[in-house]
Image (cartoon, rainbow, N blue to C red):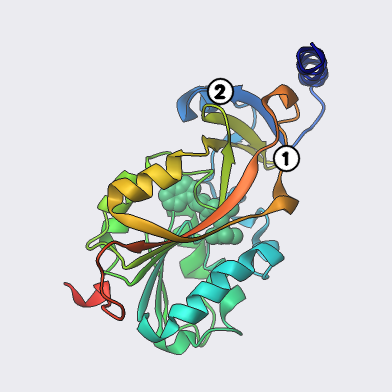
Amino acid sequence: MRSWLKHAALLAYGRFRALRREPVRFRGAFTSFDEAVAHVRPGLLAGYDHDAVTEVSRELMQHVPLWDYPILYWLKRLAPEITRVVDAGGHIGVKYRAFAPYLDLDRIDWIVYDLPALVAAGRAQVRTGERTLSFVERIEEAPAADVLLASGLLPYLDVPLVDLVRRLRAPPRHILLNKVVTRDGPTVVTLENFGVAEVPYQIRNVDEIPAALKTLGYDIIDTWVIDSLAHRIQTHPELGRSTYRGYVARRCGAAPGTASANET
Ligand SMILES: C[S@@+](CC[C@H](N)C(=O)[O-])C[C@H]1O[C@@H](n2cnc3c(N)ncnc32)[C@H](O)[C@@H]1O
């Protein structure tokens, strides 16, 4: 009874906030990306792939917040066997720049795969000395790599992870995922407020990514939860708090030190 009352109160409060149209970070709960896009407010851009959106949080993402350290730890630990990284959802090269003080990036080819507006901005903003940083608009254009990094991509990715990984030229030995947003119930797509845009944002059922990695033939060898990023959809608080997770997965049966990049 108490939990039913709490649910009803949260539901009423959320809908009240939605009706007031006050600016919130997350609004709406939809069953698909397409449905979310159809609800973007008139006058706002829809989705990430726009020049104006390339500026949003750009400086912030070029730093190393606490939740990036598991990724940095694994990149450092795997460094002796890494010659190439595909950074899917790598924006304008933000993590290449953020991680540069900690990794020997002179010897790691770092290929950012992202949407056309981000790739164009990234290419235009390459700095002197960043000779190992490059960009592709189609993941199949990236050469075979030892590591697929997807940091912060999964909430925005509009295709299944399995499909994305299968488009790579060769399966990487390791897949590193960070900021995967999950919940216990069914997957929900909300809209994130970027000021100039509203961007579909996927909160996945917690079993989805482990199942996708298994289908792809990977074992999860490390996983973590980023408590400080947990949030509710302000207009739908009754759906509960989301949990941000990270995963490191290794291809089953790949012998240590066998770099996939040498396979093609
Ligand atoms: C929050 S940013 C992540 C930036 C950085 N990797 C980080 O961890 O801070 C999400 C990125 O995913 C990209 N993205 C969204 N949908 C994508 C898609 N279908 N294919 C490739 N990149 C996509 C966006 O353009 C954006 O650069």
Asked if one can make out residue 240 in the rendered structure from this viewpoint, the answer is yes
- Quarter of the image for the N terminus: give it: top right
Instruction: Give the tally of numbered discs.
Output: 2
Examine the image and state in which quarter residue 138 appears: bottom left
Residue at image mark 1: 231
Tell me the quarter of the picture where residue 21 sits.
top right
**What residue type is disc 2 on?**
Phe
Compared to 11, does 178 lie above or below?
Answer: below
Comparing 137 with 153, the one in front is 153
261 sits to left or right of 198? left
SS category of the residue bearing label 1: loop
Placement of 134 over or under 232, stated as above or below: below
Decide if ligand 1 comes within 8 Å of the CB at mark 2: no
Q: Position of residue 91 (x, y in %)?
A: 52, 60
Q: In the image, which disc is placed on residue 90?
A: none
The correct choice, above or below, for 221 with respect to 260 in the image is above
Residue at figure coordinates x 33%, y 72% from the top left: 146
User: Percent position (x, y) of residue 160?
Assistant: 37, 40
Circle 1 Cα neighbour tier, 10 Å, few/some/many (<14 / 14–19 / ≥20): some
